[in-house]
Amino acid sequence: MKDDVKPQTSPETEELKAILDQAARPRARWGLRLLGLVAVAGLAYGAYLWSAGGTTVSYTTAEVKPGNLTVIVTATGSVEPTVQVDVSSEQSGTIREVLVDYNSEVTKGDVLARLDTDKLSADLKAKEAAVASARATVSKARADEQSAKAKLDRLTTLVSSRVSTQQDLDTAEYTFQAAEAARQSAEADVISAEAALEQSKLSLSKATIVSPIDGIVLSRDVDTGATVAASLEAPTLFTIAGDLRQMELQVSIDEADVGQVAVGQDATFTVDAFPDQRFPAKITSIRYAAETVSDVVTYKGILSVANDDLLLRQGMTATADIVVQSITDGLLIPNAALRYAPPATTPAETEGGGSGVFSIFRPPRQTPTSAPEPEGSERTVWVLRDGAPVAINIEIGASDGQNTVIVKGDIKEGDRVITDQTVRNG
């Protein structure tokens, strides 16, 4: 029988073995980390090679073709009568009767209402009596003047014959002058009395309120028995509109658009009451005075409107499209072609804005935007020729917001302009 004999180890040997075991552990951990990094880098590089080798670009295009283009300016406002008159009373008093109501058709001179005239009639009679009295005074003054003149003439003859004295003649002359002055004063009193009489007649006539124009009563703000106090701000009793078969549209034109709007331009508008019907109109006036509301500056535009069917009513809110420019058979391109520009990207970029695994480190690409260009400005568009985009410089004209007129440039009908592109990985 054999016994197994274990080898003997010294304390120095055990210590060396422990040191070697501790050194081996960190080397193993670093090896695993390095292996992981190599794997990730290899995966990323492989993805890059795969995406770069399979990228395809497709373009969205639109055909350049002739067409009609209309540039409009939109403005809002309200329909109003061409003539509208507020009728008030110049005479104070009590309303005795009202002869019209809302929507009453009236002609110039028709009686709308009457005031109580008892006091005015009495005043008129007093003025007539004053005139009669003044005229009687004139008659007496003329008689006195004639008597004084006759006495003066007689004494003048007697003084020449030395029958009467010079003193008697002087007295007669003074009497005649006084009679003449009294006659002139009486005549002036007649004129004053007659003026007062005319004023009284005028006051009496103003007690009858009449229509100043032909038209329709839009509002009646008085009833029988009401007291009217004439003053510097007399209350409005009636509002009368002129012929409603011819009206006007008053719109507020934005200061950015007013330079394009001119007298004589055609327009169409709609109202809420008839949303499916467009009414024709024409610009007749653009006022120079600015109107500012909440820091927004506008200018009042007046458009003439035919209202033969009487569908339109005073105060209706309207939205007008004013035709400021109209082009026939112009060469048109969509505005999207003016906004397109090929992005400066790597071949591996995808439609999602990134490429492979690197997309997680890249910020999303922003779509470029630009403000509308003024007429006559030069722009660059991209035309697809033989499957490749070609940059073409053009000069643009009017735009309606969707299409723009080409004024000049190396571009013709039938060319296809690029409006967008899509990048995909095959």
Image (cartoon, rainbow, N blue to C red):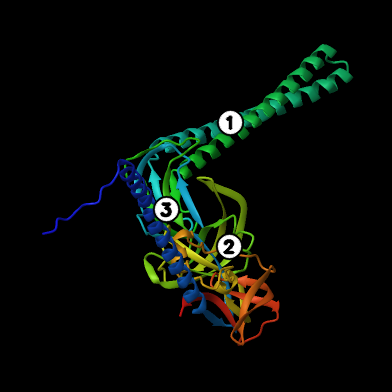
Q: Which tag, 2 or 3, sits closer to the chain's start?
A: 3
Residue 350 visible in this rendered orientation of the protein: no
Residue underneath mark 1: 134
Q: Is residue 375 left or right of residue 274?
A: right
Dividing the picture into quarters, in which one does residue 157 lie? top right
Disc ID at residue 424? none
Residue farthest toward the left in the current orientation of the protein: 1
**Residue 247: image location, x then y, percent:** 49, 64
Q: Is residue 241 left or right of residue 195?
A: left
Viewer-nearest of discs 2 and 3: 2
Instruction: State whether residue 16 is above or below residue 123.
Output: below
Dividing the picture into quarters, in which one does residue 394 lie? bottom right
Q: Mark 2 near mark 1, Cβ–Cβ under 8 Å?
A: no
Compare residues 163 and 10 and report the one nearer the observer. Answer: 10
Compare residues 346 and 250 and report the one nearer the observer. Answer: 346
Residue underneath mark 2: 370
Q: Residues within 10 Å of mark 1 (few under 14, many from 20)?
A: many
Residue 172 visible in this rendered orientation of the protein: yes
Q: Mark 2 near mark 3, Cβ–Cβ under 8 Å?
A: no
Dividing the picture into quarters, in which one does residue 223 lie? top left
Q: Residues within 10 Å of mark 2 (few under 14, many from 20)?
A: few
Disc ID at residue 111? 3
Instruction: State whether residue 64 is above or below residue 124.
Output: below
Q: Which tag, 1 or 3, sits closer to the chain's start?
A: 3
Query: The residue tagged with tag 3: helix, strand or loop?
Result: strand
The answer for how far apart the CA atoms under marks 1 and 3 are is 35 Å
In percent of the image, x 35 and y 56: which residue is there?
A: 102
Q: Residues within 10 Å of mark 3 (few under 14, many from 20)?
A: some
**Residue 319: image location, x then y, percent:** 46, 63
In percent of the image, x 81 and y 17: which residue is there?
A: 169
Q: Which tag, 2 or 1, sits closer to the chain's start?
A: 1
